[in-house]
Amino acid sequence: MKFIKREQLKEKPSDLQFGKHFTDYMFMMKYHDGGWDYDNACIKPYEPFVLDPSTSVFHYGQAVFEGLKAYKNDKGEVRLFRPMENMKRMNDSCWRLCIPQFDEKFVHDAIAELVKTEKDWIPTAPGTSLYIRPFVIATDETLGVHSSKNYIMAVILSPVGAYYAHGFDPVRLYVEENYKRACKGGTGNHKVAGNYAASILAADEAEKKGYDQTLWLDAAENKYMEEVGSMNIFFVINGKVVTPKLGGSILPGITRRSTIELLKARGYDVEERLVSVKEVVDAAKDGTLDEIFGTGTAAVVSPVGEFGFEGKDYKVGDGKLGKVTKYVYDELTGIQTGVKPDEFGWVERVI
Ligand SMILES: *Cc1c(COP(=O)(O)O)cnc(C)c1O
């Protein structure tokens, strides 16, 4: 891998707001003349792209991304959590947007190399990590609508603080009945940039009404829970864990899968099936809705204290952090940071 050294290193930030600060170096690889240019792929100083205004990604949004984290403990050990799953999912997203497939092992190794280069940027305080953002954009310079013949793949790194700096803070969700995030046959089950563009209006409106995030319903029947903002969702109803099954419109989260595998291995009943709003509202009314939590790389696990539907708010359990939610958080973050044994073979030591 080529390495281009930078003259002067940046000053490390003192606040670690999510996605605000970026490290000294980035990974970059181009696709041109019918292939990914592995020979000229490089780790180089973090810097702006210079792109022609006609560049196709600006107009038609042919872009995919990923999100994963590197964790460093106080011994200086650095770990990645299931990184090959991110590589595989990014290739799946590329396939859906007609972006050429890439060598997953090559990009994985490039990420490991980049993380090693930037090891001094990885915070060590509990709950902190280095967020890794790989992405691919289409770079043909034309307004013609077709799949591009040129692409840039890049990976940037951002040190991030503890999601729960002041303890677990249960979020309030707004069950969205008008706008849709995804439908079967669309792109909702892939990590493509446009999914987010289409979801911002609903998120803004939910926020204005005093909620933290949108809880999406299915597009066909407007009846079934799908997922939240950038998280998958789990319900604990009458002691049983249920999560919406992946039906082509839900993003297959790696934290979601890990949560299911972990809970099943520890003897919990976990069901992947359709979960209607009615079922959850009824459970809230008769007192059997024990917990709701979201799962995703950024927060790992996010407790839900309340949700709003058809103008009414429903409390989840006692509105505080639930038992299963805390268990999943403690176990997953324990494995990620090397505090708990990695019985599933999920973590990869980089340093
Ligand atoms: C990334 C993402 C998730 C969570 O996936 P993880 O692999 O667990 O980080 C959930 N929903 C959407 C829409 C996402 O983009």
Image: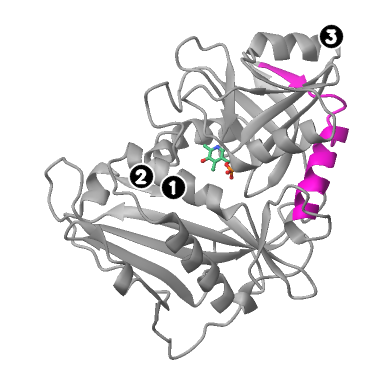
Res 304 quadrant in image? top right
- From the viewer's perspective, is the residue at label 2 or at label 3 nearer? 2
Say the numbered circle drawn on residue 94. Answer: 2
Distance between mark 2 and mark 3 Cα atoms: 45 Å
Question: Which quarter of the rendered image does ligand 1 occupy?
Answer: top right
Q: Residue at x 44, y 39 (%)?
A: 196
Q: Mark 2: few, some, or many residues within 10 Å (few <14, many ≥20)?
A: many
- The stretch drawn in magenta includes residue 322: yes
Query: Closer to the N terminus: mark 2 or mark 3?
Result: 2
Q: Secondary structure at mark 2?
A: helix
Q: Residue at x 64, y 15 (%)?
A: 275
Residue under label 1, please give it. 90
Q: Secondary structure at mark 1?
A: helix
Q: Residue at x 20, y 61 (%)?
A: 32
Which range is magenta?
Answer: 312-335
Residue type at mark 2: give it. Cys
Residue 328 in percent (x, y) is at 79, 40
Say the numbered circle drawn on residue 341. Answer: none
Split into 4 quadrants, where in the image is the N terminus?
bottom left
Query: Closer to the N terminus: mark 1 or mark 3?
Result: 1
Residue under label 3, please give it. 286
Q: Is residue 79 left or right of residue 93?
A: right
Distance between mark 1 and mark 3 Cα atoms: 42 Å
Residue type at mark 1: give it. Met
Residue type at mark 3: give it. Asp
